[in-house]
Image (tube, grey):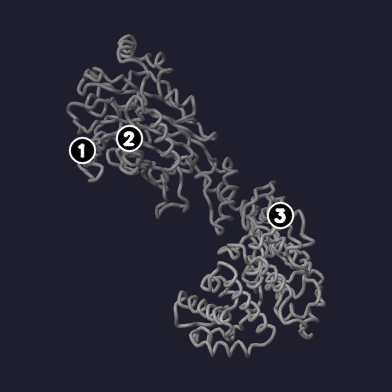
Amino acid sequence: MTSFFYGDTDSTERDVREKIKRTLIKERQSEYTTKSGIRVFCGTWNVNGQLPNEETYPLDAWLHLDEAADIYAIGFQELNLNVTAHIVNDPLKEGKWKKYIEDFFKNNRVTKNIKFEMVSSIKLVGILLIVYANKKLMSKITDVRQHSYATGIAGILGNKGGVAVGCKVYETSICFVNCHLAAHQEYFEERNKQFQYIYKRLELPPTKDSQYPETLLIDSYNTLFWLGDLNYRINESYEYVVELVDIDAENVYDTLRKSDQLYIQRKARNAFADFHEAEICFAPTYKYDPGTDRFDSSEKNRIPAYCDRVLYKSIAEINTHILSYNSHPALKLSDHKPVSCLASTEVSEIDEKAYKRVYKDVQSTLDLRENEMLPKCILSCQEIDFSTLVVGEEYKETLTLHNDGQSTFSYKFKDHLESKKCCPDWISIHPKTGDVPKGRKTEIEISVNVGYNHMTQFYEKYGKFYMEEVLILDLVKGSDKFITVKGELTPSAFGLSLDILCRMNFRAVALESERLKELKSEQLIIPVPKEIFLMVDTLTKCLSQKGLFPKEPSSKRMQDVRLAIDTCDKPLLDYIKTEDPQAISSMLFVFLESLPNPIIDESCYGNFIQGYQQFTLLKQVISNMREPNKSTFQYLIKFLALVVEKNSATVKELSQLFANCFLRKPKKLVLDISMAEEEKRKEKIIEYFIDKSRKREY
């Protein structure tokens, strides 16, 4: 349980200052509050569906006190046993019991001169909780909340479950829970489970009159009274318990304690672990023949048990003690006897003048302390140098954040204004957001993986093989931190344009940034990139192998192929000891897709798609293409035609595989055909060219 008035609940960012202020004021509570005790009566009765009968069973026998309580929390179970009560609400019995109780307050010799008013009332099928208070106390009772939680049939219907009423009395929060847990001797574990559900899940939402907007768990209250038919049984025989009661009813619990399921489960901390209960000095409250003091005489002979209980818990600063704890066997209306518990519990009352003085002082102190509450973060480094990077390889480093401030801080990586992203696609951050508690550290993984599909963006962004990025670490409510991530990419042919590739008469790994700029203005020296030639030449020698072109690119040994392409100009199989042509064909796809511009210029794309059946037109467009695009296209089409002749691959299969390598749709182009139709036409175009090449017509 928390030491806040209401307990810790999540605050939105705009509420942080207010929450801190409340905390600081609470820490000085002794300066502006005085404690006093109030008397709280808790009563529970399973009425077995019976209606009240004032003449036969007056409530004085249950609710009368020699000195009236300040607050009465009265709980009923099995108010209605009708099977339709789970579906249809019947207010008749609820109304009669409320009137019965109010008549008690009006007529009882102790309470008739005291005005009592209802604080709240809540009902869940047969479970009813009504809270009354002395009218003089009503002005000091605020933030009244109520809610219910069903644990019965399917976890939805309220034949079992709990209801709660919470409020503030002066400046102390008090909550009352009335519950009815699972029946039957052997179901103690189900009772434990239902208790946990109610305890952890029953929330009290704010009302329009609530001072604070948080939804509260029942455990967040300063003092919690829990009453009801808990249904825990005695693990002894019927005859044994009845005999003990006949001998000494008042002290029988001392003998039965170790057989009491609730005592056993509390001791094992399976239920009501932190609750207290007063000493039991009365006979079992269940099960009786209605109208008598005789235990169950039916064939079932249900074992007498202490099903009906009242427990409580308070935070350390509040003293709660029990004045009386009794059953009331004179009320024979039901098969249960009612139980009452009178407690004295402390509440804190505010001295307004002293409070204003503390409030003003806290406001001033808070202004000074806000600087201390600002995030203070120590980074393990402000520069992460990955040194040498290789395309297709992943590299990882760890960035450590140490919270050296006075409070938990939150962080996130901020987007750059231009890119609208916190980092380029080849840099990954995990996690991108988080919280670091005071005095703790957290680790953030920064990884770099310049994939084949990133190479074009990489060259366009940096214009060289060196990467340097600045990550912006945003400390919420604090200043930004800047982390530089850098590394030098090993030059590769992947991602370079056809123009650049056909101007290179040296290995790609030998390419330097300055040389890359110079190549843009030089003359073409070869018609087809040597990298494409190396892959096609090698695949031509493997045409007899089935499955040469897998439908899904194979990652197996692809990095070996990439290294061979970038570092040599000899047949690839001389560098790959184990023949793996599928890796080479997969890398051919990757290479063509990594080209910054497609082989067929994007400006031709619309005409190709619209005129996909006019082969003469398509052929003319290709013949008018500039070099090296034209030669590269023709070279690859002839290769695919050869594959059809020498390998088991069909024209249709190859056109489906290579269509997107040749034709790439411009981002801003809009066509009035479906995507499926568009793909179909692209494949048809490539199919035309392969087929015509086979027939030597192209």
Callout 2: SS? strand
- Say left or right for 354 vs 283: right
Instruction: Please tell me how crowded label 1 is: few (under 14), some (14-19), or many (20+) other residues with Cα within 10 Å.
Output: few
Amino acid type, mark 1: Asn
Q: Residues within 10 Å of mark 2 (few under 14, many from 20)?
A: many
Looking at the image, which residue sits at the far left?
55
| Relative height, residue 272 to residue 83 (above, below) | above
Name the kind of residue labelled 2 in the image: Ile
Cα distance in 3D space between marks 2 and 3:
52 Å
- Report the residue at 64% width, 65% height from top: 414
- Residue 333 seen in the figure: yes
The C terminus: image quadrant: bottom right
Mark 3 residue type = Lys
* Residue 484 makes an appearance in the image: no
Closer to the camera in the image, 208 or 291: 291
In percent of width and height, residue 670 lies at 50, 82
The residue carrying mark 1 is 82
Q: CA distance from mark 3 to mark 1?
A: 63 Å
Q: In the rendered view, would you say 242 is above or below 542?
A: above
The reply to whether dot 3 and dot 1 touch (C-beta < 8 Å) is: no
Q: Which dot marks residue 376?
A: 3
Q: CA distance from mark 1 to mark 2?
A: 22 Å
Residue ID for mark 2: 74
Closer to the eye: label 1 or 2: 1
